[in-house]
Image (tube, rainbow, N blue to C red):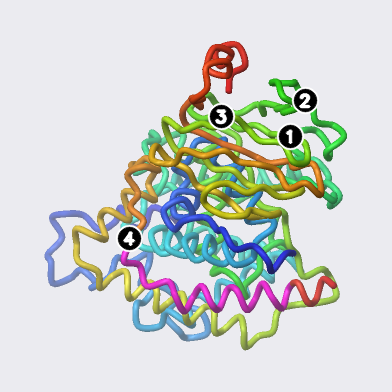
């Protein structure tokens, strides 16, 4: 548990996560960040508490049928649904991400997108995209801006851009107004989780030509 | 036993009707009204012991009481979230079955039973209605040998009661917006960052519980 995280999730994202209103890719981002950040986990759980109040206040209820309790006891008697055994804690990927990758960092199926930068798109619903990014130590992701909201969280190493320096657990929230060139620290290769609800657009010609093929 | 509400018919003289609907008002445990608004803290701590009785002794009587209280609320919540009544009832049963199976994971220093049930119902809604996976953060547990401090449990339950009062006191329009969000009627872009929700104290309380939990895990 890192106490050094300084870039956190916003209240609206945490409330939307508690309300179950986010696309799957964003849920994955929030769940991954909360695994590393107790500050945001406490905030998220306080938004859950609001949901608890809303549920509790369904005073009028919707009457359930006479045999509903018996049906539920029968369901219980069938035993708990088999769930995957909890994944072991790994050095790089928190458990929610491991579920999507199928293991820790060694299980990631990278595809090169040029200039040493690699990505792995994770299987989520299409409303938004989640991918892992690998930026070699000292390298830069081409200067780009964003159509929608893009959240980038550092899992390994660190990067800097025009805004600030981001280390493990830090989330950079970018929107249409941010135009940046993230550069990985020289000390270590940088791995990030990035989610966006729109395709990235690159400012330089080459990356923009490649964009349709690369799904970036 | 869950259809008592239907026995209050519309042509019954108003004076004969109890102030509160009978299936709520009659429910009493240890002489304390369980559903009354005047006794919310006790209410929720009672539900905590119900979950413990399920966890420790597979207590079916405790489960039946929880079911009677929560199942109609879960069903109503799911109907307002866009489900039809049949599916909502099926899901309510599955949510309650999950409560039984996961009773050992409930942490009363971080959530009320209502909050915990809400999170299970919400995940069921995402799974069944939106047909989407729900990534959840890494699980944290007290483990068999450690339990949260009773004072922490009571404090959290009290903070939750205060939050509920504060929500009730919000202007109608704002409260409706919050309900809409939790019924899944607002997209994430429609959820404003300035909610005006008084979450400062409960957030600190949960943070404290998380710190203690981390400490007990190490």
Read off the residue under disc 3.
A129
Range of the magenta residues?
B195-213
Please check the rendered image and state whether residue B58 is part of the magenta-colored stretch, yes or no.
Answer: no
Residue A94 visible, this angle? no
Read off the residue under disc 1.
A134
Mark toward the viewer: 1 or 3:
1
* Residue lying at 60% horizontally and 35% vertically, measured from the top left: B133
Rendered location of residue A8, percent (x, y): 55, 58
Q: Are marks 4 and 2 on the same chain?
A: no
Q: Nearer the viewer, residue B61 or B171?
A: B171
Read off the residue under disc 2.
A110
Q: Are marks 4 and 1 on the same chain?
A: no
Secondary structure type for disc 1: strand
Read off the residue under disc 4.
B194
Residue B6 visible, this angle? yes
Q: Nearer the viewer, residue B31 or B53?
A: B53
């Amino acid at each position: 548990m890192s106490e050094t995280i300084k870039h956190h999730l916003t209240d609206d994202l945490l409330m939307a996560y508690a309300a179950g209103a986010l696309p799957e890719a964003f849920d994955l981002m929030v769940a991954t960040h909360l695994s590393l950040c107790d500050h945001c986990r406490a905030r998220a759980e306080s938004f859950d508490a609001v949901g608890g109040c809303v549920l509790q206040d369904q005073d009028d209820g919707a009457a359930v049928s006479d045999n509903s309790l018996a049906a539920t006891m029968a369901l219980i008697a069938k035993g708990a649904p088999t769930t995957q055994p909890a994944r072991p804690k790994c050095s790089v990927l928190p458990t929610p991400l491991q579920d999507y990758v199928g293991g820790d960092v060694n299980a990631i199926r990278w595809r090169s997108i040029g200039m040493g930068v690699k990505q792995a798109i994770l299987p989520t619903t299409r409303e938004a995209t989640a991918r892992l990014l690998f930026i070699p130590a000292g390298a830069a992701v081409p200067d780009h801006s964003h159509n929608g909201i893009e959240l980038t969280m550092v899992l390994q190493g660190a990067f800097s851009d025009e805004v600030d320096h981001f280390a493990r657990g830090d989330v950079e929230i970018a929107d249409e107004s941010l135009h940046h060139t993230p550069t990985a620290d020289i000390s270590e290769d940088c791995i990030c989780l990035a989610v966006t609800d729109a395709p990235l657009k690159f400012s330089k010609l080459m990356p923009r030509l490649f964009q349709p093929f690369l799904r970036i | 036993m869950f259809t008592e509400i239907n026995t209050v018919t519309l042509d019954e003289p108003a004076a004969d009707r109890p102030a509160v609907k009978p299936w709520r008002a009659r429910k009493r445990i240890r002489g304390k009204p369980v559903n009354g608004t005047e006794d919310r803290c006790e209410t929720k701590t009672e539900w905590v012991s119900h979950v413990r009785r399920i966890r420790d002794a597979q207590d079916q009587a405790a489960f039946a009481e929880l079911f009677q209280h929560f199942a109609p609320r879960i069903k109503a919540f799911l109907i307002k979230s866009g489900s039809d009544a049949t599916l909502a009832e099926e899901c309510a049963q599955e949510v309650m079955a999950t409560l039984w199976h996961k009773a050992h994971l409930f942490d009363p220093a971080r959530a009320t039973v209502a909050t915990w049930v809400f999170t299970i119902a919400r995940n069921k809604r995402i799974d069944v209605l939106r047909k989407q996976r729900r990534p959840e953060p890494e699980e944290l547990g007290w483990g068999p040998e450690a339990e949260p401090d009773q004072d922490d449990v009571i404090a959290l339950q009290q903070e939750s009661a205060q939050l509920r009062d504060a929500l009730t006191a919000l202007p109608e329009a704002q409260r409706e917006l919050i309900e809409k969000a939790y019924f899944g009627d607002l997209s994430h872009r429609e959820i404003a960052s300035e909610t005006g929700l008084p979450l400062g104290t409960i957030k600190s309380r949960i943070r404290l519980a998380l710190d203690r939990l981390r400490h007990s895990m190490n």
